[in-house]
Amino acid sequence: MFAIEFFIYIFSIVFISFVIIVLGYLVGKITIKGVSLGTASILLVALLYGVFASKYPEFTLGGNTIIL
């Protein structure tokens, strides 16, 4: 039982990290008047995730409780 919970925990960390990196990469591709954030947007998205996760550690979406 412990191994399954540990696997889910590790998978959750890897998945959230992957989502943060992908969203940061996509935000970094946006160019406004010739200026883009580039890879710094990954840090920006990670900071926004940290703020969101601290204010709303869990929420309900479609009947499922999601814990950040």
Image (cartoon, rainbow, N blue to C red):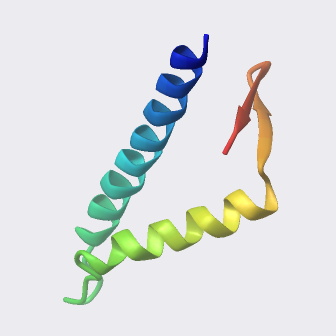
The vertical placement of 36 against 15, above or below, is: below
- The answer to whether residue 22 is left or right of residue 8 is left
Q: Residue at x 48, y 67 (%)?
A: 46
Q: Position of residue 10 (x, y in %)?
A: 46, 35
Q: Nearer the viewer, residue 12 or 65?
A: 12
Q: Position of residue 55 (x, y in %)?
A: 80, 62
Q: Residue furthest top?
A: 1
Q: Position of residue 26 (x, y in %)?
A: 29, 59
Q: Nearer the viewer, residue 16 or 39?
A: 16
- The answer to whether residue 8 is left or right of residue 39 is right
- The answer to whether residue 24 is left or right of residue 31 is right
Q: Residue at x 27, y 62 (%)?
A: 25
The vertical placement of 32 against 24, above or below, is: below
The total number of labels drawn is 0
Q: Quadrant of residue 68?
A: top right
Q: Quadrant of the N terminus?
A: top right
Q: Residue at x 58, y 62 (%)?
A: 49
The vertical placement of 56 against 64, above or below, is: below
Q: Quadrant of residue 51?
A: bottom right
Q: Residue furthest left?
A: 34
Q: Position of residue 57 (x, y in %)?
A: 77, 50
- The answer to whether residue 33 is left or right of residue 14 is left
Q: Residue at x 19, y 89 (%)?
A: 34
